Amino acid sequence: MDIAALKKEAKSKKTLASRLLELARNSDPTVQYAVASNPNTHLAALEYLSGHGKWTILKAVALNPNVSVAILEKLAVHKQNTVCVAVAQSTKVPAQLLAKLARHSDTAVRRAVTENENCTDTILTLLGQDPDSLVRFDVALRTACPVGILEKLAYDHDEQVRCAVAWNKCVPTKDLRVLTTDLKANVRASTVRNLRQRGELQLLLTLARDADAEIRLAIVNENAGTWNNQLHNHLVTDEDEKVRECLAQHYELPKNKMLILAKDHSHQVRESLACRDNLSKAVLEVLLQDPNPEVRRTLAYAKPSRIPNWVLEQLASDPDETVRWEVAYNNYTSNKVLNELLQDPIQDVREAALETLNRSWR
């Protein structure tokens, strides 16, 4: 039997345990790997592979749901750190062994320990004091992280660790409030989601006027589902283009604010607005006269909702050929307009109009 057939047999969940043990003894490492990865492989085959396989196979053994604690203990001291990482990721690894791996010299192994569901509060407390900030970051991100650890990590010297604390939904509100005044902008920005979920409007209002645009952008992004005049009104004329561009896509952006953004001095803000569905007639009239063809082209770009016929008709005679091409390619463009575009001086536009007319599912 060739190797491909053996691999297929080794992967199959229908293969008998006795046969999987035979396949585990095959000299081909790809066959052994397939056996080690098979969730139906019994302990005898895993025990054999744990003493004979390459490190890539040993990783698969460690992650197999049928692996024993005895095998994991043997693999936990393997010289290849990636094998130890796999042991730390195993759902069968006991807390006692995780505690040993929490003191492993390799950062990747300790990081894997922080993500294991069998990790105890005692182990997390130890890792919360780890010399490597990446490990402390992982601890701070853990949803089930004990409050006492989060309280300490909220004052960690590494800003990314403090960001992780600010993101954690279990962080005490008192510590979250402290992080809103952090010297680092990315830490302050990281508090916004939790503040929104906890209804801390006053703190959000303060951050909405923060001197750093990163925080104001976070306010827009994290509060995109509900419009709040106190929170959003002044951001329509924010000095930062990215803030206004993001605000142009706010789900509940009022029509009068759309009109302001339709006249924004940044074409990227206007283009962001033009991407929206269901723009008011007043906004459409402004954007149709936009000096930038990219904005006008975006108006004609296919959207989930129907584009008004009068808009497409006007854009069909646009001086820019890319705008006319977009109209010609739009499924909502009427046959009348498409037939007119068949006479366009630009071949690409004519071809797009013909293709659209010929679509059977229009």
Image: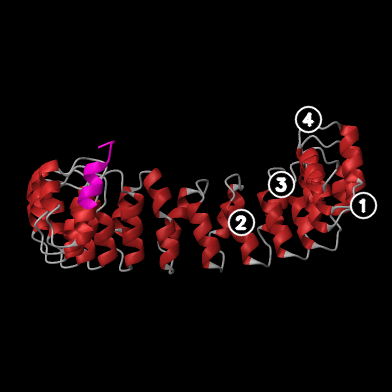
**Residue labelled with disc 1:** 51
Distance in Å between CA atoms under marks 3 and 4: 34 Å
Amino acid type assigned to the residue bearing label 1 in the image: Gly
Q: Nearer the viewer, residue 50 or 4?
A: 4
**Residue labelled with disc 2:** 138
Whether residue 235 can be seen here = no
- Secondary element at tag 4: loop
**Residue labelled with disc 4:** 14
Amino acid type assigned to the residue bearing label 3 in the image: Cys
Labels 4 and 2: the sequence-earlier one: 4
Q: Nearer the viewer, residue 307 or 198?
A: 307
Q: Position of residue 187 (x, y in %)?
A: 45, 62
Labels 2 and 1: the sequence-earlier one: 1
Distance in Å between CA atoms under marks 1 and 3: 27 Å
Whether residue 32 can be seen here = yes
Task: Find the magenta span and give its range.
Answer: 352-362
Amino acid type assigned to the residue bearing label 4 in the image: Lys
Labels 1 and 4: the sequence-earlier one: 4
Amino acid type assigned to the residue bearing label 2 in the image: Asp
Quarter containing the C terminus: top left
Q: Position of residue 341 (x, y in %)?
A: 13, 53
**Badge nearest the viewer, 2 or 1:** 1
